[in-house]
Image (spheres, rainbow, N blue to C red):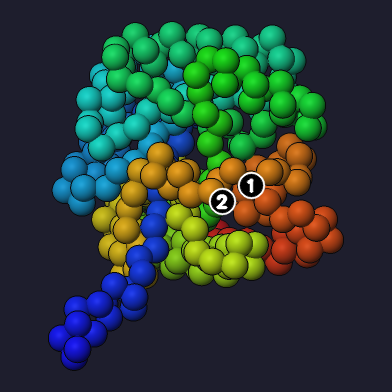
Amino acid sequence: MKHLLFLFFPLFSFAQRQVALTLDDAPVMALPGYYTAPQRKATNEKLLQQITALRTPVSVFINGANCIVPDNQLLLRKWADHPLVTLGSHTLNHPDCAALPLDSFKMEVTINDYIIRAVAKDKPVPYFRFPFNAMGKDSLAQAATIGYLKEKGYTAVPFTVESSDYMFEQVYQEALKKKDLRKAKAIGEAYIRYTLFSFDYFEKLTREVFGRDIPQVYLCHVNQLNADYYTTLVKALQQRGYQCISLQQAMQDKAYGTPLYDHRRYGFSWLFRWIPDAAIRKSHLRNSPEPDKELAVFK
Ligand SMILES: [Zn+2]
């Protein structure tokens, strides 16, 4: 009997948390001229190497307009060729889709589809993420955009946790440009600290909304900050009890079938959108994490 207890105990005490890592703006961020070509190449390759070494599945969301030049097309091919990478569309030009007429939205999706498939060949492109997570100006517009995506074979994907990585990236780049490596390191560490703080917040919110843990979907971007801190981030999440899983595995949880109760155009976490009571939702949104304090030190 003693032996049996010993065998079964670990199964109950180490229920693992799960997270799907998702990176937007692959293979390069939308701002033209922000990175030099070698910096772009290094960022993408460094991320891919760590994905291989750590064996973490990831999903990337692609802006086709940035993939027309041959150098960037090559980078896209590297993502497409990687067995742990799932591809998603992120529109052609990264517009705010809540401000677009439906026809222009369709064009953004169709042309992006054409560009990705020209590179990805037979690799499936099952997912779509709206730039800024703006799905449409109201519930009717959102039903139209999501309906169109379904027709094209895309699943529009949510996220549950984010940590404003793009804001940390901005000050990180400024520090690197000034060759202030000590400051850059402090920013990288602040980013990881703030990300773990965000996970802690959204884990608590998850338990409030669902009464249990669910697999989380973390949204960040293909940028140098994440390339430099990917291993640190993954290890820190593993330390927190997380196992990295694919987006497909995460979305199998029935939580992801919860109806949306908030159809505003803003890009906040789906955990808020899944709260039926508007007053409770608003009070949570008011108290959600903001990185301003962490960032103020570096400005
Ligand atoms: Zn984006």
Pick the front one: 290 or 5: 5
Crowd class of label 1 (few under 14; some 14 to 19; many from 20; radius 10 Å): few
Q: Position of residue 12 (x, y in %)?
A: 34, 75
Q: Using the image, tell me which numbered label, if any, was put on residue 233.
A: none
Which SS class for mark 2?
helix
Considering every residue shown, the one lying at the far right of the view is: 279
Pick the front one: 184 or 164: 164
Whether residue 222 is situated above or below residue 235 in the rendered picture: above
Q: Amino acid at mark 2?
A: Ala
Q: Position of residue 72 (x, y in %)?
A: 32, 20
Whether residue 131 is situated above or below residue 66 in the rendered picture: below
Q: Position of residue 184 (x, y in %)?
A: 37, 58
Q: For this view, does 245 lie left or right of residue 162?
A: left
Q: Residue at x 39, y 63 (%)?
A: 17
Q: Residue at x 65, y 21 (%)?
A: 147
Crowd class of label 2 (few under 14; some 14 to 19; many from 20; radius 10 Å): some
Pick the front one: 257 or 120: 257
Q: Position of residue 13 (x, y in %)?
A: 34, 78
Q: The N terminus is located in which quarter?
A: bottom left
Q: For this view, does 187 lie left or right of residue 234?
A: right
Q: How many numbered circles are shown?
A: 2
Q: Is residue 1 visible?
A: yes
Q: Residue at x 39, y 34 (%)?
A: 60
Q: Amino acid at mark 1?
A: Thr
Residue receiving disc 1: 258
Mark 2 C-beta to ligand 1 under 8 Å: no
Q: Are marks 2 and 1 in contact (CB under 8 Å)?
A: yes
Residue 275 sits in quarter: bottom right
Q: The C terminus is located in which quarter?
A: bottom right
Residue receiving disc 2: 255
Q: Residue at x 25, y 77 (%)?
A: 8
